[in-house]
Each structure stands twice: as structure tokens, then as C-alpha cells.
Amino acid sequence: MKIIAIGGEPAVGKTTLINDFFLKIDWWEEFKFKKVYGHYNKKINTIIVGKYGTNTIFAGTDKLSMSVHPDFKQFVNLNKKFNILFEGDRLFSKSILEFCDEKNILHTIILESNFTEKRHFERKDNQSQKFLKGRKTKIQNIKKLNLKKNIKIFENNNLTQKNTIYDYIFELLTKK
């Protein structure tokens, strides 16, 4: 079992990247464990945590309860066979990352982009500068964590880079 955690500042393309999994890999089934919602794919034996398929800008783990942490930790403790993939602020936290790292199953990815300001404008979000600054600080602090496996940082500015990230994740999920 592996856990792949994807984080980054708002508008770096985390949710868009995960939405590609639903387009590139068929046969997703809905999954639920207490407050943990997601989608399961038998072919790659993976659960993507979060609510996707909605026509809203903020999908994924943003749609989960603010109190999902205890249920997520319980699911990780009980899970012995599924890979878990998640992105977004709700679960991409110091406590969740350190919890998963203790089990030596965590692969952490941080996305960065030069186009966040443009993406904020295009999606017409109203996230305050204070909120955005707080998320930037959070990601900078996570980069400093002493995780067993190094944090992998990817630029996500164009299709070539996005495909490189996708290929890296897919290889992690399918490699024995």
C-alpha cells in the first residue's frame, strides 16, 4: 500500500491533475468510509480521496468535512491493500503527512506554478490575500518537514509538465 499526497498553493492545478485520472483510467466506483469519500479503481487498486465529478471549481478533498482527519487516520490504519491518492488542503497537513510517514508508505508531491494569479482570475475565486498568504506559509513549512521519503516538487505550467507529473504518479501506483 502507498499513499500519494499532492499539495501546493491554491490554483497550482492539483484538482485538475486528479480530474485527469478519471479521464485516462476508466471504471471508477464510489467509495465511502465514515467521513472519507472517494473513488476506487480496481485496475490500479487505488482510492482517490475526495468528491469529484461536480461542476464546481473546488472539488476533491475541499468537499470533505472539516473533521475528516480522525476518520482518514482510522481508514489508513485499517487499510492493508489499497493505494490512496489525495490532493488538496483538507488532508495535506503536517499532522496527516507525519502520520502517514510513520507508516513508511507516504510519497509527497508539491505542485508549483507561475500561473496561479491567472488561474485565480479565470476561475473567479474570492480567496482573500490573507488566506492565500496562509496557504503559502503552510506549504513552505511542509517543505521543511523531515519525511522519510523526500518531498518531490514539480512545476505545473504546461501540458508537458502535467503529463510528467501524471506519469510519475501512475508509476508510483502501479510499481510493485
Image: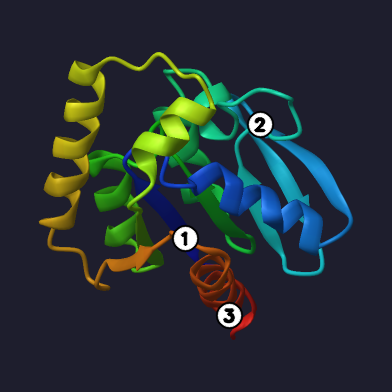
- Say the numbered circle drawn on residue 171: 3
Which residue is denoted by mark 1 in the rendering? 4
- First along the sequence among labels 1 and 3: 1
Q: Which residue occupies 35% across, 53% down?
A: 113
- The amino acid type of the residue labelled 3 equals Glu
- Say the numbered circle drawn on residue 51: 2
Local secondary structure at mark 3: helix
Q: Is residue 55 visible?
A: yes
* Residue 126 x, y percent position in the rendering: 40, 13
Q: Quarter-wise, where is residue 41 in the image?
A: bottom right
- Say the numbered circle drawn on residue 18: none
- Screen quadrant of the C terminus: bottom right
Local secondary structure at mark 2: loop
Badge 2: few (under 14), some or many (20 or more) residues near its Cα, within 10 Å?
some
Q: Is residue 10 visible?
A: no
Local secondary structure at mark 1: strand
* Residue 50 x, y percent position in the rendering: 60, 36
Horizontal side of residue 50 vs 12, given as left or right: right
Q: Which residue occupies 20% across, 38% down?
A: 136
Badge 1: few (under 14), some or many (20 or more) residues near its Cα, within 10 Å?
many
Give the Cα distance between marks 2 and 3.
Answer: 23 Å
- Screen quadrant of the N terminus: bottom right
* Residue 58 x, y percent position in the rendering: 55, 26
